[in-house]
Image (tube, rainbow, N blue to C red):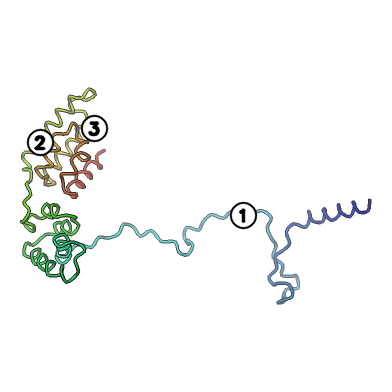
Amino acid sequence: MIRWASIVIVFAACARSGPPPARLFADGTGGCPDAGGCDVPVETEPRFAPPDEDHPPPGTDPELGPAETREASCTDVGISAASIEVGNYADEETRAPTARKFRARCLKARLGAVERQCVFEAADAATIAWCAPRFWPQLAVAFVEPATCAGLTQPIRDRMNALPDGQPGQEAWARQLAAVQRSCEEDRWTVAFGQCASSMQTASYVVPYCQHVAPAPLVTRLQDRLAKLP
């Protein structure tokens, strides 16, 4: 009977005590200058503190915004064009004369900032020829005359209106077709791209089904126009 009473007393004492208080000094080391003791109470309930937005933790990158694009120079144009003509894997000694040749051509042609950037970012010769025909005369590019763009888009309009759920002047379709025609007039369509676009059933098919016959910058411009439609 005395043994069971001892066990109950021990359990009751443990329940009241909770976790042991933390100490500022390990046992047998240091000393506490405070007469009231240096024990640090341990909270039994966790607390939640919202993150400090004004003082983020170390290593957190701040929001720097969109990266700035450096304007391509004729030197950049020469290097990029040389890598396409002689190949990316050619050594510096092989590419250097070609890069100087194209740099000189860029200066002589007086390429504008948009043209230089377009040539610099081009991934193939056909795109360079589209970006700046006078810079890359060895590859001729046939362009659509802006005055003929209405005739190119009219077959698309006729097919859209002939669809079972189509109707002349449908608002959404009309906006898409207007964007396609404006792109034709202002974005320098190639003849191959214009022929492909004119054969599409709807304006929304032009990009996915005709992008294989258009330079990448042209496709990007048309995509941007369509993406901005309400």
x 54%, y 54%: residue: 50
Q: Which mark is residue 172?
A: 3
Residue located 6% across and 46% down the image: 142
Instruction: Tell me the kind of residue under disc 1.
Output: Arg
Residue 187 appears left or right of 172 = left
Question: Whole-percent x and y of residue 11?
Answer: 82, 53
Which type of secondary structure does the marked residue at label 3 adopt? helix
Looking at the rendered structure, the kind of residue marked 2 is Leu
- Asked if labels 1 and 3 touch by Cβ distance under 8 angstroms, the answer is no
> Which quarter of the image is occupied by the C terminus?
top left
Q: Which residue is mark 2?
A: 152
Of residues 141 and 159, which is closer to you in this image?
141
The residue that disc 1 covers is 47
Mark 1 or 2, nearer chain start:
1
Residue 62, position in %: x, y?
40, 61
Secondary structure found at label 2: helix
Separation of residues labelled 1 and 2 (CA atoms)? 69 Å
Task: Kindly identify the amino acid type of the residue bearing the numbered disc 3.
Answer: Ala
**As displayed, is residue 192 above or below residue 69?**
above
Give the CA separation, mark 2 to mark 3: 19 Å
Percent across and percent down for residue 217 are 18, 50
Residue sitting nearer the eye, 70 or 163: 163
Q: Quadrant of residue 69?
A: bottom left
